[in-house]
Image (spheres, rainbow, N blue to C red):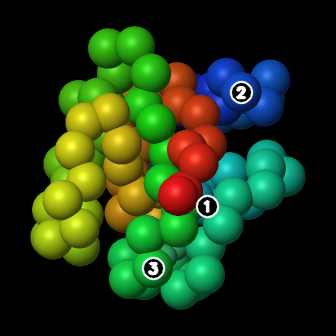
Amino acid sequence: MPRVTFEDQGKAADFPAGKTLLSCALEMGIVISHVCGGDGACGTCRVEVLGTCWDLLTPPTPDETYKELEAPYRLSCQAKLIGDVIVKVAKVE
Ligand code: FES
C-alpha cells in the first residue's frame, strides 16, 4: 500500500491506491481546508508535493488545470494515490 507522509505535520500512514490525499489527510487527523467537501470547486484543499513523487499521484484533473494549479501544487481532493508520496499542506492566499 502507498505511504502518505505529511512532512509539515510529522505524520505518515499507509493507504490503498486510488484514495484521495484529502481522505488520507482527514483520516490522519490533519486539519486541511475543504470548503466544497471535495468537489474540486473551492481550491482550498491545496497541498504541495515534495521531492520527486509528482508522478505517484494520478494526473491533474480538469478542475485543477482550470484553476491553473501547477507543479508542485495539487488539489488534495482530486489527487489519488499511485505510490508513496511526501506532501505538505499549502497555504491558500
Ligand atoms: S475540497 Fe474544494 S477543491 Fe478540494
Sequence-wise, the earlier of marks 3 and 2 is 2
Number of labelled discs? Answer: 3
Q: Secondary structure at mark 2?
A: loop
Depicted 79 relative to depicted 1: above or below: below
Picture quadrant where residue 73 is located: top left
Hey, which residue is sitting farthest right in the picture? 29
Residue that appears at 38% across and 76% down: 40
Between 19 and 34, the one nearer to me in the picture: 34
Q: Nearer the viewer, mark 1 or mark 3?
A: 3
Q: Rounded to the nearest whole Å, what is the CA distance between mark 3 and mark 2?
A: 22 Å
Q: Are marks 2 and 1 in contact (CB under 8 Å)?
A: no
Separation of marks 2 and 1 at Cα, in angstroms: 17 Å
Above-or-below relation of 60 to 88: below
Q: Please name whichever residue, 56 or 42, is drawn nearer the observer in this view of the structure.
A: 42
Residue type beneath disc 1? Ser
Mark 2, other Cα within 10 Å: few <14 / some 14–19 / many ≥20: few
Q: Calculate the distance from the C-alpha at mark 1 to the C-alpha at mark 3.
A: 16 Å
What's the mark number on residue 8? 2
Looking at mark 1, is its residue's CB closer than 8 Å to ligand 1? no
Is disc 3 in contact with disc 2, using a CB cutoff of under 8 Å?
no
Q: What percent of the width, then of the height, locates residue 44?
A: 53, 67
The residue where tag 1 is placed is 23
* Category of crowding for the residue at label 3, using alpha-carbon neighbours closer than 10 angstroms: few (below 14), some (14–19), many (at least 20): some
- Residue identified by numbered label 3: 42
